Image: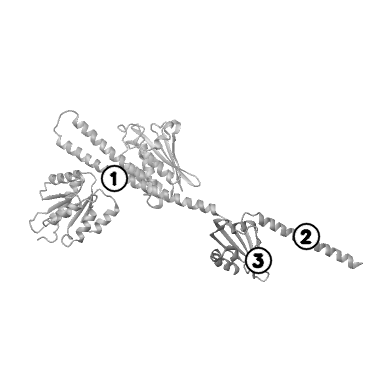
Amino acid sequence: MPSNQEVTILVVEDDAIDVKALLTAFKKLKIANPVTVAKDGIEGWEVLQDISRPYLIILDINMPRMNGIELLEKIRASEKFHDSIVFILTTSTDDKDKFEAYDLNAAGYMLKSDMGTSFIRAIEMVERYWKVIEFPGTD
Amino acid sequence: MTDNTVRVPVERQLVLLQEDVRQGEEWLHTLVRGVPQSFMYMDHEQRIVFANEVFLRNTGWVDKDVRGIHLSEIHGPELYASRTQHIDKALAGETVSYEATGRKGDGMGFFHHEFKPNFDAEGNVTGIFATATDITDRRDIEMKLESKQQELIRSNRDLEQFAYVASHDLKAPLRAIDVLVQWLREDLADFEGGDVHENLDLLGQRTQRLGRLLDDLLDYSRVGRKIGDFVEVDCTAMVRELIELLGDTGGISIEIDGELPTFATYSTPLEQVFRNLIGNAAKHHPGPTGKVTISCEETDTQYVFNVTDDGAGISSEYADRVFKMFQTLKPRDEVEGSGMGLAIVNRIVEWQGGRVWFEAGLGDHGTVFSFQWQK
């Protein structure tokens, strides 16, 4: 990353314990970046409106009201947010979901197996990602 | 005088001949009247020459004299129009057969029709023999079978979906419980009251077990759905690989006795059966050492595979029970197992048209599990 701007993390996840496990993983890895949590696609879209760049999104698929794939479609169709970096973190082993996620240019599709190690590995990877990769359109 | 003696035999011969012809005709009429099919002969102008009772009954011309009547008049314009393409072919010298709905007395039926052209000495078509065989019942049964099949496919799909959703949705809170137990362990690491640590261990184990039961339930529901590819399978290689994957089985040796076949079949389900049976034999062995053997026999249509162990044996009173879902012979705290392994084996083996059973081993020692696999 060129500047010292901190990456904002937007977590879109409906399961309270999954959220807790994610936040615990951040804490264990001593990551102090600002994290916002939205509980479904609709709330996720609302939070996105006021988010500051650079940011990345960790997105669950199975959520009520608006699921992850639907939110991703909306993101890619929007003028302002179409270049978002989105990582999918889901229990779904459905090939259809994986296909659609990558079809909508997800940066990566990760499976939640258990909430301990798999979350730590996911967050480790995401941290490495933002430390190395140049983010789009930082203003 | 000589004229008379010559003429009488000829006249007599003529009478005899006429008698033969009459008998022949009578024979023919009886035959045609007796067959259960509709039978009719019409000339090349499609006028009825002869029709049997079944024909008259079907077409609604009972007790009427149909000789000389044109076929279009018998069938009516609509039905006749649907027949003309076949009649034309027959009039051109072709034997035609087709199946169609047609009139059957007061209602409709489904018939198999045959038109056979009749040729004169010069090869011209002089008329058509037409038979119609009533296959209404057969068609009914075919359609019922088709709809039953559709029902079955639908019901299987529903079952698969139910099992997937059930195990998927049931696993979500399970993952939560699992991580909560982890956090409790971490937070209570220094706690020294009561049976807290033992209880947390038990809690963790039960959660793992529930997870395995759900996975096995999903596997069970998937039998016959995820069948993989139909390929050439080298059973010796497959079993050897499975033995390797089992890894450290303590003092239990697993061997192949004799030859295992190489043949074309669905590899995934076959592997699953071997994996479960061989894994079971190794897992349930009570002693520190033992032997598991895999062998094969052949019949015209099947292979019969045997997995033999020299373990504790299974009482024949459990013959049916062991193949049911979630059945274990030992408490789950002694031998960890969901009880689904044999139920899955049973379902797979039956799905491809075979049977699985077990018998006591040689000298009433140990067990032999055998299963039939179609060639």
Q: Amino acid at mark 2?
A: Glu
Q: Residue at x 34, y 44 (%)?
A: B219
Tell me the CA gap for discs 2 and 1.
87 Å
Is circle 3 on the same chain as circle 2? yes
Question: CB under 8 Å between callouts 2 and 1?
Answer: no
Chain of the residue displaying label 3: B
B171 with respect to B70 (left or right): left
The label shown at residue B68 is 3
Is circle 2 on the same chain as circle 1? yes
Q: Nearer the viewer, residue A29 or B264?
A: A29
Residue shown at 40% from the left, 52% from the top: B230
Residue positioned most to the left: A4
Kind of element beneath mark 3: loop
Identify the residue at the far top of this view.
Answer: B194
Q: Which badge, 3 or 2, comes first in the chain's sequence? A: 2
Residue highlighted by disc 1:
B168
Name the mark nearer the viewer: 1 or 3: 3
Q: Residues within 10 Å of mark 3 (few under 14, many from 20)?
A: some
**Rendering quarter of residue B215:** top left
Residue under circle 2?
B19
Label 1–label 3 contact, CB within 8 A: no
Q: Looking at this rendering, what residue extends furthest in the right direction?
A: B1
Earlier sequence position, callout 2 versus callout 1? 2
3 vs 2, front mark = 3
CB under 8 Å between callouts 3 and 2?
Answer: no
Task: Please state which amino acid type lies under the numbered disc 1.
Answer: His
